[in-house]
Image (cartoon, grey):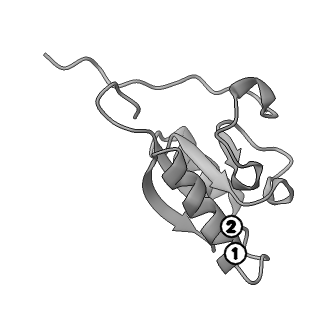
Amino acid sequence: MVSSLSRPVAAIWIPSHVDPIEPHLLACLDHARRCRYDLLGIVTTAPWDEVRQMMIDGKVDVVVVAEREHLPPDRTPRIEVAARGAHPSPASSPRGPVLPRRRRPRQG
């Protein structure tokens, strides 16, 4: 999904139990804008497993959540917490099992 010609694609995930969602959504939108991600969408009703499958299927490169408490304990990378402020370094992010990256074949 990521190439030298495109920006990473992000999805924002806000767990369904979070209410109100507005402050969390604004934090995530601001984070995605600062990181210059292309936003695929905002997920507020799907369970984590569906968002995780979007990552596995290569539909998104990164999932943004508002707070560390919103992260599921069995998360897979790459997930960024908007409340942290600046774009996090890979070394500072908690990581689960690393899935192999799927790349598109080179064109012409």
Q: Nearer the viewer, residue 2 or 67?
A: 67
Question: Where's residue 11, x and y in %?
Answer: 53, 55
Q: Is residue 102 visible?
A: yes
Would you identify the image quadrant in which residue 82 lies? Answer: bottom right
Pointer 2 residue = 14
Would you identify the image quadrant in which residue 46 lies? Answer: bottom right
Q: Where is the N terminus found, in terms of image quarters? A: top left
Mark 1 or 2, which is nearer the eye?
Answer: 1
Q: Is residue 46 visible?
A: no
Among all residues in the image, which is located at the extreme bottom?
A: 20
Asked if residue 9 is positioned above or below residue 49 in the image, the reply reads above
- Label 2: how many residues lie within 10 Å, few (<14), some (14-19) or many (20+)? many
Mark 1 or 2, nearer chain start: 2
| Residue at 51% across, 40% down | 61
Q: Where is the C terminus found, in terms of image quarters? A: top left
What mark, if any, has residue 36 been given in the picture? Answer: none
What separation in Å lies between label 1 and label 2 (alpha carbons)?
11 Å
Q: Amino acid at mark 2?
A: Ile
Question: Where's residue 21, x and y in %?
Answer: 69, 78
Pointer 1 residue = 23
| Residue at 63% across, 70% down | 25
Q: Amino acid at mark 1?
A: Pro
> Could you tell whether 15 is left or right of 25 in the image?
right
Asked if residue 35 is positioned above or below residue 21 in the image, the reply reads above
- Total numbered labels: 2
> Could you tell whether 97 is left or right of 106 in the image?
right
Question: Where's residue 74, x and y in %?
Answer: 82, 44
> Could you tell whether 72 is left or right of 46 in the image?
right
Say what secondary structure mark 2 lies in: loop
| Residue at 63% across, 27% down | 99
- Label 1: how many residues lie within 10 Å, few (<14), some (14-19) or many (20+)? few
Look at the numbered discs 1 and 2 and tell me whether their residues touch, using CB distance below 8 Å. Answer: no
